[in-house]
Image (cartoon, grey):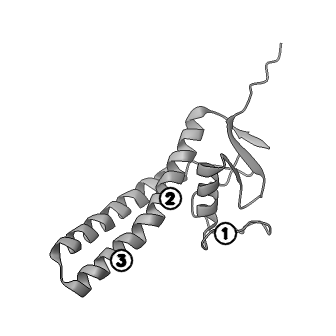
Amino acid sequence: MHRLPSRFTIFRFRLAAILLCAKCLLAPIAAGILLLSTLTGEHAHAKLGVGLALLTLLIAFVQWIMAARTPCPLCMTPVLAKKHCVTHRHARPLLGSYRLRVACAILFRNTFHCPYCHEPTAMEVREKKYRG
């Protein structure tokens, strides 16, 4: 099982995972509230829906920046970024998204399998080997 090089790398992985999950939750909520405001004609709901949509876009932008710096320790492909690479034959999606499965695994299991090389990685700092 692979481990990550530093605590800051673990922080980046967790932050990118939280932002990805928030984006996946906020987008349908914003769309639902906008649809509800269209059907009922409520301006307060429309303002809330537009605000949530703008927040979702902001979260998506920050997540895009953070996810570019989340490489797998073995294959060095960013596991939380959309790269359109061929996935491993044993990789399975969650709700149609391989990245969402990795994000949920990071947050809830503290370990993940890279969808591209399918190697397990623990969210721990690797031990330094001292030569001396």
Packing grade of label 1 (10 A; few <14, some 14-19, many >=20) is few
In the rendered structure, which disc, 3 or 2, sits on the residue that comes first in sequence? 2
Q: Amino acid at mark 1?
A: Pro
C-alpha span from label 3 to label 1: 24 Å
In the displayed orientation, state which residue is furthest to the top: 132
The numbered disc on residue 80 is: none
Residue beneath disc 2 = 20
In the displayed orientation, state which residue is furthest to the left: 43
Q: Residue at x 18, y 78 (%)?
A: 42
Percent x, y for residue 99? 60, 62
Percent x, y for residue 63? 47, 55
Q: Nearer the viewer, mark 3 or mark 2?
A: 3
Q: Amino acid at mark 2?
A: Leu
Q: On the rendered image, what quadrant is the C terminus found in?
A: top right
The one nearer the camera, 49 or 59, is: 49
Q: On the rendered image, what quadrant is the N terminus found in?
A: top right
In the rendered structure, which disc, 3 or 1, sits on the residue that comes first in sequence? 3
Tag 2 and tag 1, C-beta contact below 8 Å = no
In the displayed orientation, state which residue is furthest to the bottom: 39
Q: Residue at x 60, y 72 (%)?
A: 95
Q: Is residue 49 above or below residue 35?
A: above
Q: Does the rendering let one see residue 74?
A: no
Residue beneath disc 1 = 93
The one nearer the camera, 21 or 6, is: 21
Q: Amino acid at mark 3?
A: Gly
The numbered disc on residue 32 is: 3
The one nearer the camera, 56 or 85, is: 56
Packing grade of label 2 (10 A; few <14, some 14-19, many >=20) is many
Packing grade of label 3 (10 A; few <14, some 14-19, many >=20) is few
